[in-house]
Image (cartoon, rainbow, N blue to C red):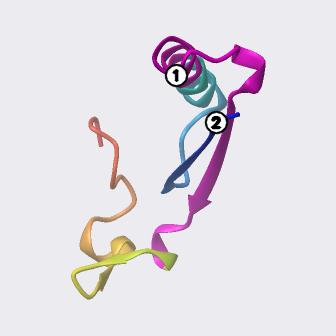
């Protein structure tokens, strides 16, 4: 029973999460040879003020749109 944890900054839409979960589940079923009902995907979302890289908070280093291609 695969449990897949995704850690990311907050801000993605429910539509985006649904698309992601479908794609990840489909891939796990195919590659790991398991039933889709055995695949669990967990999202851990973080505020950018609670995430830092290279000694800087992401809210300071990248601003609000960090992590999205079109921002």
Q: Pinpoint residue 2: horizontal percent, then vertical percent.
A: 64, 36
Quarter placement of the N terminus: top right
Q: Pinpoint residue 49: horizontal percent, then vertical percent.
A: 48, 77
Of the pair 14 and 19, the residue shown nearer to us: 19
Quarter placement of the C terminus: top left
Image vertical order of residue 52 relative to residue 64, above or below: below
Image side of residue 3 versus residue 57, left or right: right
* Structural distance between the alpha carbons of marks 1 and 2: 9 Å
Q: What's the mark number on residue 32?
A: 1
In the rendered structure, does residue 31 fall within the stretch colored magenta? yes
Image vertical order of residue 61 relative to residue 69, above or below: below
- Which structural element holds mark 1? helix
* Crowd around label 1: few <14 · some 14–19 · many ≥20 (10 Å): few
Q: Which residues are magenta?
A: 23-49
Of the pair 9 and 2, the residue shown nearer to us: 2
Q: Pinpoint residue 48: horizontal percent, then vertical percent.
A: 46, 68
Of the pair 50 and 64, the residue shown nearer to us: 50
Of the pair 55 and 66, the residue shown nearer to us: 55
Q: Name the residue tied to disc 2.
A: 2
Measuring 40% from the left and 60% from the top, which residue is drawn there?
A: 64
């Amino acid at each position: 029973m695969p449990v897949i944890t995704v850690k990311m900054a907050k801000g993605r839409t429910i539509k985006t999460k649904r698309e992601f979960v479908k794609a990840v589940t489909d891939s796990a079923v195919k590659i790991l040879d398991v039933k889709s009902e055995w695949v669990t995907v967990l999202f851990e979302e973080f505020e950018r003020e609670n995430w830092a890289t290279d000694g800087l908070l992401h809210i300071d280093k990248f601003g609000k749109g960090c992590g999205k291609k079109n921002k």
